[in-house]
Image (spheres, rainbow, N blue to C red):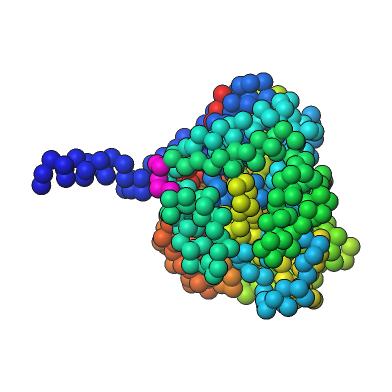
Amino acid sequence: MDQHTIEKTEEQLLFNHQRYPYASQRSAMYSKRGMVATSQPLAAQAGLDMLKKGGNAIDAAIATAACLTVVEPTSNGIGGDAFALVWTKGKLHGLNSSGPAPQGISADALRERGYEKIPKFGWEPVTVPGAPAAWAELSRRFGKLPLTEALKPAIAYAEEGYPVSPVLGNYWNKAYHEYKKAQKHNEFQSWFDTFAPNGRAPEIGEVWRSPGHAATLREIAETEAESFYRGALANQISAASEAEGGFLRKEDLAAFYPEWVEPIKADYKGYEVWEIPPNGQGIVALMALNLLKEYDFPEIESAERYHKQIEAIKLSFMDAKKYVTDTTHMKVTADALLSEEYAEKRRQLIGEEALLPEPGTPPKGGTVYLAAADEEGNMVSFIQSNYMGFGSGIVVPDTGISLQNRGHDFSLDEDHHNCLCPGKRTYHTIIPGFLTKDGKPVGPFGVMGGYMQPQGHVQVIMNTIDFGLNPQSALDAPRWQWIEGKEVLVERSVPQHIAEELVRKGHDVKVATDGGAFGRGQIIWRNSETGVLTGGTEGRTDGAVAAW
């Protein structure tokens, strides 16, 4: 072996970005003046920079969120939706910034194009993006710094570039091959031009930049998102849609404004767990906790705990998938679904064997998450997403605007509660969470990842309240995910004897080969007496806690 070969081999070992042969441990992070936790270290640091410049937790959340569209585009983008829970001045505020279906689309229009269900990619599943409006609205109502300041880090990373992190690079490469396989004509060409400029996905450690993305963010900042909805950027989005046979038009963008909503809650063993109301699926977590609060679990690693959590999630999901949609179209209320009467009725269905769940009859009546906190007591739970990875595969040329495919969750069945209608918001998977006790804030939490999200919320909240785990340990604990029917996916770290016992209880248990299916979470808790912040971040991604 010559010297050149030896050196090359050593370099390959030194920069082997995917090889982690040993289990590692993260400690919970502590700080006093401020903290930001999210799935990408550069974005977390961008948020912390806002706190050091005199901004508050809201400014930090905005900076982090905008930065994530650049440094983690595999999970979110400028063309996605957002939700937020904001604790400030003794009150919890909810923001729903999910966009509706275009006015020109309908179930009939898609059936006329030959679709039996809404496709995953292309212009058809594109709905009005809500994320830029969320940044502007949060800044206007609660921020201390101008939006132009909060978006500076994101603009700089887009212009100057940044090295791609390990988990990000892995998902980027998967998306590249998925769009290559799915492309029938040239509908994804702008995606390839933007996110695969060298004819491939950028490699781990390689610097990627997007000047169009930077220009768009700068215009959003300078116009407080008006350009995106009622100006030059809106015209570009509309023109691209019209040219490619899409339904989205500038009138749809112009009509959109975020909605301030009253958060909903479940009381769980002395704590209050808060979520955004429907059209989000946070109500699934609350319904499940309503079922589980009557049980005592003496130890965390018990088959009985896993079994009852899974059964509660099954029942809650079946109700949500039937009833949850845009609130103006819902035929049952959130209060009915969360009532003690209904919880008791559903709890009686949980036995010793795995069940095949069905919806009940209530009484009438690809995602990024971040948590931010400051020394004044402001706390933010924020989530945004393009839904499935990069989303629809559609990128508005020269803008870096990667459009979401959120409309894929609509049904074309006219009798379905979530049937596609013009101007309707669909059942939404992204959910920020917040925890309080006796009316005082404990802090923000969240677990991203499609239908894993409410399942992750239930698991980390129970890890915290039932078993006393700190934020990092609550996130590190082994996870499960109910898929459908009796099928359950578990992590390899779930003890073998528990998996075997679940099989004996009738569950169809499958062991996952990696942790990507189990969500990626962040937690920040605040000690109400000392003001000390404790944070945890997800070991299943490139997560980081930036603290001051």
Q: Quick check: can you spot residue 301?
A: no
Q: Is residue 203 magenta?
A: yes
Q: Quadrant of residue 63?
A: top right
Q: Main secondary structure of the magenta part?
A: loop
Magenta segment: does it hold 224?
no
Identify which residue, 432 or 146, lies in the foreground. Answer: 146
Q: Of 396 and 346, which appears nearest the observer?
A: 396
Q: Residue at x 86, y 60 (%)?
A: 328
The vertical placement of 274 against 51, above or below, is below
Say above or below: 40 vs 361: above
Q: Is residue 221 visible?
A: yes
User: How many labels were placed on the picture?
Assistant: 0
Give x and y (percent) for residue 543: 50, 41
Q: Furthest-right residue in view?
A: 365
Q: Nearer the viewer, residue 66 or 228?
A: 228
| Quadrant assignment, res 365 | bottom right
Image check: 114 left or right of 69? right
Q: Position of residue 72 (x, y in %)?
A: 54, 45
Name the residue rendered at 56%, 55% in the picture.
190
Q: Where does the magenta region start and end?
A: 202-206
Residue 16, position as x, y percentages in the image: 31, 45
| Residue 366: x %, y % from top left | 57, 54
Q: Residue furthest left?
A: 1
Q: 438 or 370, which lies in front?
A: 370
Q: At 11% from the left edge and 44% from the top edge, which residue is drawn? A: 2
Residue at left offset 71%, top offset 26%: 145
Look at the image and tell me in which quarter the C terminus lies: top right
